[in-house]
Amino acid sequence: MSYTTYSFQDVTAAFSCPSVGAASSTGAGIGTISINMATEKTVHEVAADGNVMISKILGDNGTVALSLQQTSQLHKYLLNWYNYINSKSSAIKAWASMVITISSANLGDKTICTGVSPQKLADRPYQAQGQLVTWTLMCAEITQS
């Protein structure tokens, strides 16, 4: 019998922005990471006579959604990053300068996201019990191996 094992403990995400510095997901209160590609890679156009024209569409953009504990160090890092790149004094080139590298030692895969910018500031919940906040980050290019 053969089997494989998955563990989120083996997944790491490294965040790097030249103007703000680096952070890691290790022990940083992360709940989930979801990588979503945005561009459909092919389109089929069917003519009236049934002839199919296939188009290959370029584009490796997408989003990374991170669910984090609202008290986590990674959430604080992303708030600091957002406030810096959104400030009037920051250069426009800082806006999409973040790189995120997500890897799983057990699965042997790696995802590199470049040109990362925030879709919006994460929502901020307040209630009796601490919550998760979700950051949706847009990526100009996502490569997976």
Image: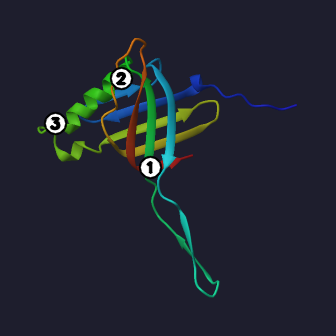
The single residue placed furthest to the right in the displayed view is 1
Residue sitting nearer the eye, 54 or 115: 54
Q: Nearer the viewer, mark 2 or mark 1?
A: 2
Q: Earlier in the sequence, mark 3 or mark 2?
A: 3
The secondary element bearing badge 1 is classed as strand
Say which amino acid is labelled 1: Gly
Note whether 72 is above or below 93 in the view shown.
Answer: above
How far apart are the two marked residues, 2 and 1, measured between alpha carbons?
26 Å
**Residue 98, horizontal then vertical, whole percent:** 33, 39
Q: Earlier in the sequence, mark 3 or mark 1?
A: 1
How far apart are the two marked residues, 3 and 2, measured between alpha carbons?
23 Å
The scheme the figure's colours follow is: rainbow
Crowd rating for badge 2 (residues with CA inside 10 Å; few <14, some 14–19, many 20+): few
The secondary element bearing badge 2 is classed as loop
Residue at 42% x, 51% y is 141
**Residue 130, horizontal then vertical, whole percent:** 41, 15
How far apart are the two marked residues, 3 and 1, measured between alpha carbons?
24 Å
Q: With 3 as the anchor, is 79 left or right in this view?
A: left
- In the picture, which quadrant includes the N terminus? top right
The secondary element bearing badge 3 is classed as loop
Say which amino acid is labelled 3: Ser
Numbered mark located on residue 62 in the image? 1
Marks 3 and 2 close (CB-CB < 8 Å): no
Numbered mark located on residue 125 in the image? 2
**Residue 38, horizontal then vertical, whole percent:** 47, 53
Crowd rating for badge 1 (residues with CA inside 10 Å; few <14, some 14–19, many 20+): some
Which residue is identified by label 3?
Answer: 87
Marks 3 and 1 close (CB-CB < 8 Å): no
Say which amino acid is labelled 2: Pro
